[in-house]
């Protein structure tokens, strides 16, 4: 976590501060409800002493009307307060989800480092909900404290010893409840971490389900998830035991305290220090106090779990950026890419020039080298050494978001969205280049095969299409974005050779005048490139036209024509 990033305490305070109006309104209504409920046994005691003992029907009727009014007010306040408090929690959780989403989608990256997508989803849902619950329970806690205060005042009016017993006994009980909640807080954090990890593993396995089936690795995947799920279950059970122990211990303490109040009240009544009505009121208040104490127990448990979740959210929000921002890019870019002494992962002091408006093929035997090159060009990470520049300006000096308006790196494993084919192609682009992009990628042929053409809604990740069809739609999306520099990584590996040749011939025309980089081993695509660069051991070992390299370089033939 960065030193300047938010902490769990900051996250909690901001969640509460953002809903302060709702929290204040709900607290006032909740306190009114609890005060009215505390007054019910007091009024019943007054009825016994002033109406039942004297036999006055008029006084009895008046106090019964007062009692009915109390019930009307407390029921109305309860319903209204509950609606407002739930809204406060949902709004607080929603704002946290927006903050988390903004951080995860930050062009500088870094939030997903060492975190599975499912784990981030769990943090944005379960943890955000738990922190939002803190804004909900504040009103309950204040209402419970108001009930305790009114009960203490009422008991003091009945008997000073009873009132002092409540006033002096409440602070130690609250302190003990806080101390007892510490193990629950620790175990709740462990529970959420395990649950998030299990969610991430499940999402990871579902994403690669077809690959696992093709490899016959279903049993290994099941064993992996079973172990992860068992770890999550064990953490959840430990948290549940801690929660039960916490609630049981606090309930036992409050039960002893309330019994003590009842015993003191009975003793005072036997000595004649209080009347029968006051004894009934005291016993009623003692029984009523169980509710506020249980409410405070619930609030304390929610705070404990909320603090644990807030720390997890703060870790994501405070994640250091993978790359730093810089100056904005010019409105227009020529498209000259220059790499000087670039080292990252498998890349070793790579020097490479990619000329503006050219189509350049890059061939590498090592997939890791291709991945490292793509990460440098897209600024997912900056090279350990060396410089990557656009039109002579180092990428590290440019703002990542602005840079991506000029350079688009289309990865091999790009996913499609659960939307129409046309919406997928138009994502991140205007409408002017869509038809040309569909034709150049042969995605228009895919559209003609679908029931509703371009308006057919695709399944999640485009799974209603074949692998080759998905690649063509993803390529159309990359072309439609119309960036000055487009880097394509193996865009046709699942496409048949006839269609691949057609795409290759159209691709050059579609990208005329703009810089295009093809990181691929496809002979059809490399044949339309102005120049092919061969990388081996992280450095350039050969370059030339595809036909020249295929004729003169045996290593090239082994990679491209095998």
Image: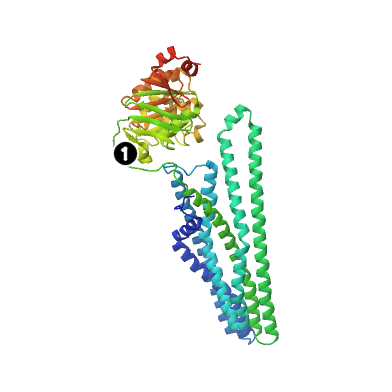
- Tag count in the figure? 1
Residue found at the very far top of the displayed protein: 551
Query: With 311 as the anchor, is 398 left or right in this view?
Result: left
Q: Nearer the viewer, residue 499 or 535?
A: 535
Tell whether 239 sits left or right of 384.
Answer: right
Residue 423 visible here: no
Q: From the viewer's perspective, is residue 153 above or below residue 346?
A: below
Residue at numbered disc 1: 329
Residue 343, percent from left and from top: 44, 32
Quarter residue 164 falls in = bottom right
Q: Is 427 situated left or right of 271 in this image?
A: left
Relative to 429, 193 lies left or right: right
* Secondary structure type for disc 1: loop
Q: Residue 336: give x, y in percent of width and height.
A: 32, 29
Residue at screen point 60% across, 47% down: 194
Image coordinates for residue 352, horizontal then vertical, percent: 38, 27
Residue 194 shows up from this direction: yes
Mark 1: few, some, or many residues within 10 Å (few <14, many ≥20)?
Answer: many
Picture residue at 56% right of the left edge, 55% below the top:
308
Percent from the top left, x then y, of residue 491? Answer: 45, 26
- In the picture shown, does residue 504 fall above or below 129? above
């Amino acid at each position: 976590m960065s030193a300047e990033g938010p902490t769990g305490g900051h996250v909690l305070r901001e969640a509460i501060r953002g809903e302060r109006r709702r929290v204040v309104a709900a607290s006032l209504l909740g306190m009114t409800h609890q005060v009215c409920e505390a007054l019910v046994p007091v009024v019943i005691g007054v009825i016994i002493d002033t109406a039942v003992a004297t036999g006055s029907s008029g006084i009895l009727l008046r106090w019964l009307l007062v009692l009915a009014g109390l019930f009307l007010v407390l029921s109305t306040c309860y319903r209204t307060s509950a609606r407002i408090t739930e809204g406060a929690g949902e709004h607080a959780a929603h704002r946290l989800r927006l903050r988390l989403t903004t951080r995860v989608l930050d062009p500088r990256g870094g939030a997903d480092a060492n975190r599975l997508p499912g784990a981030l989803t769990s943090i944005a849902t379960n943890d955000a909900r738990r922190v939002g619950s803190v804004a909900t329970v504040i009103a309950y806690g204040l209402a419970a404290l108001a009930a305790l205060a009114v009960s203490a005042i009422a008991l003091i009016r009945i008997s000073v010893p009873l009132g002092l017993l409540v006033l002096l006994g409440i602070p130690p009980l609250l302190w003990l409840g806080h101390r007892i909640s510490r193990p629950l807080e620790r175990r709740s954090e462990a529970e959420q971490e395990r649950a998030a990890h299990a969610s991430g593993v499940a999402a990871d396995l579902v994403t690669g389900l077809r690959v696992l089936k093709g490899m016959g690795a279903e049993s290994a995947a099941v064993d992996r998830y079973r172990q992860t799920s068992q770890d999550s279950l064990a953490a959840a059970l430990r948290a549940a035991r801690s929660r039960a122990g916490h609630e049981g211990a606090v309930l036992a303490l409050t039960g002893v305290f309330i019994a003590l109040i009842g015993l003191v009240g009975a003793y005072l009544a036997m000595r004649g220090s209080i009347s029968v009505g006051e004894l009934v009121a005291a016993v009623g208040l003692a029984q009523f106090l169980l509710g506020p104490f249980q409410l405070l127990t619930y609030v304390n448990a929610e705070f404990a779990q909320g603090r644990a979740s807030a720390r997890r959210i703060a870790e994501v929000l405070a994640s250091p950026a993978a790359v730093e921002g810089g100056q904005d890019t010019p409105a227009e870019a020529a498209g000259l890419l220059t790499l000087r002494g670039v080292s990252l992962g498998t890349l070793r002091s790579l020097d490479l020039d990619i000329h503006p408006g050219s189509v350049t093929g890059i061939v590498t035997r090592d997939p890791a080298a291709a991945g490292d090159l793509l990460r440098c060009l897209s600024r997912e990470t900056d090279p350990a050494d060396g410089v990557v520049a656009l039109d002579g300006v180092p990428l590290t000096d440019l703002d990542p978001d602005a840079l991506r308006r000029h350079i688009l790196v289309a990865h091999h494993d790009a996913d499609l969205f659960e939307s129409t084919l046309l919406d997928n192609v138009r994502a991140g682009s205007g409408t002017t280049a869509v038809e040309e992009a569909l034709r150049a990628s042969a995605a228009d042929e895919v559209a003609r095969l679908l029931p509703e053409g371009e308006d057919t809604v695709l399944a999640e990740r485009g799974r209603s299409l074949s692998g080759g069809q998905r690649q063509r739609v993803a390529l159309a999306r990359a072309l439609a974005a119309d960036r000055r520099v487009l880097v394509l990584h193996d865009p046709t590996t699942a496409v048949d050779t006839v269609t691949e040749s057609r795409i290759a011939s159209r691709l050059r025309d579609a990208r005329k005048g703009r810089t295009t980089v093809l990181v691929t081993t496809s002979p059809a695509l490399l044949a339309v490139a102005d120049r092919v660069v061969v990388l081996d051991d992280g450095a350039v070992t050969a370059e030339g036209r595809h036909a020249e390299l295929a004729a003169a370089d045996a290593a090239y033939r082994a990679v491209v024509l095998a």
